[in-house]
Amino acid sequence: AAGTASVAFNARKITTARGPEPRQDRSARTKAVILDVASELFATRGFRHTSVKDIAEAVEMTKGAVYFHYPTKEALAVAVVEGHYAYWPRLLEEVQRRELPPLETALAMLDGAALAFRDNVVVRGGARLQIERPHIDAELPTPYVDWTELLRSLLSDAYGKGQLASDVDPGAAARSLVSAFFGVQHVSDVLHGRADITDRWAETRDLFLRALRP
Ligand SMILES: CCC[C@@H]1OCC(CO)=C1C(=O)O
């Protein structure tokens, strides 16, 4: 159950997160700096209005030096979106160390996601790029599916433990939570740059709890 979901998340971690370089050398650090700056520019200006020249100037490198690490602007967008998704398996490991019941684990994951959408530049950049995916000529990860599977798995466990009302369908609840969270973070971003995301998410989470619990 939860194992399969966290496997889904962890599979992304294996395929996307950059494991520790055999030597933490300059190029790894340079790559990370370029990724953070590209994330910030993509998050604030969007893909189309960000050029590799803008990114190179922001990191005080030549365009050639940036292209050495990322051959195209699209490759940078893919790296930012993959970095966005690589965040969640790390958050899941941290949350699972608290050994909470499954319903509380699901909600703690979304509480942590709200903070990451506010504070983590790669998460913010990846979220904007996913909105703009029709304009990005690259294979980007399919959005929402991993979160939906993780929450479905956790909510199925919660159902089995009597944490949910008997007429709640864990799959429907998972899909609804993903859509609600997506909307909450998007409205908060458009109206307030996500400054109020934790309050807005808490309101939505508390309404869901009234609907989910026995
Ligand atoms: C947790 C809600 C889903 C989440 O919200 C923004 C976004 C970016 O596409 C998501 C995703 O792809 O999983």
Image (tube, grey):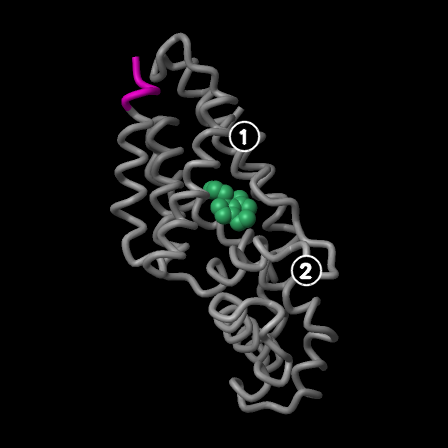
Left or right placement of residue 9 versus residue 170 in this view: right
Residue 146 belongs to the span the image colors magenta: no
Q: Secondary structure at mark 1?
A: helix
Query: Mark 2: which amino acid?
Result: His
Residue drawn at x 59%, y 75% as measured from the top left = 50
Ligand 1 has an atom within 8 Å of the beta carbon of the residue at disc 1:
no
Residue drawn at x 52%, y 22% as measured from the top left = 171
View extreme (front): residue? 191
Answer with the quarter of the image where residue 104 lies.
top left
Q: Identify residue for label 1.
A: 3
Q: Earlier in the sequence, mark 2 or mark 1?
A: 1
Q: Which span is picked out in magenta?
A: 210-214
- Residue 89 in view of the camera: no
Position of 144 relative to 211 (above/below): below
The rendered magenta stretch, by its main secondary structure, is classed as helix
Q: Identify residue for label 2.
A: 135
Pinpoint residue 177: horizontal percent, then vertical percent: 43, 32
Q: CA distance from mark 2 to mark 1?
A: 35 Å
**Closer to the camera in the image, 28 or 155:** 155
Pinpoint residue 119: horizontal percent, then vertical percent: 37, 61
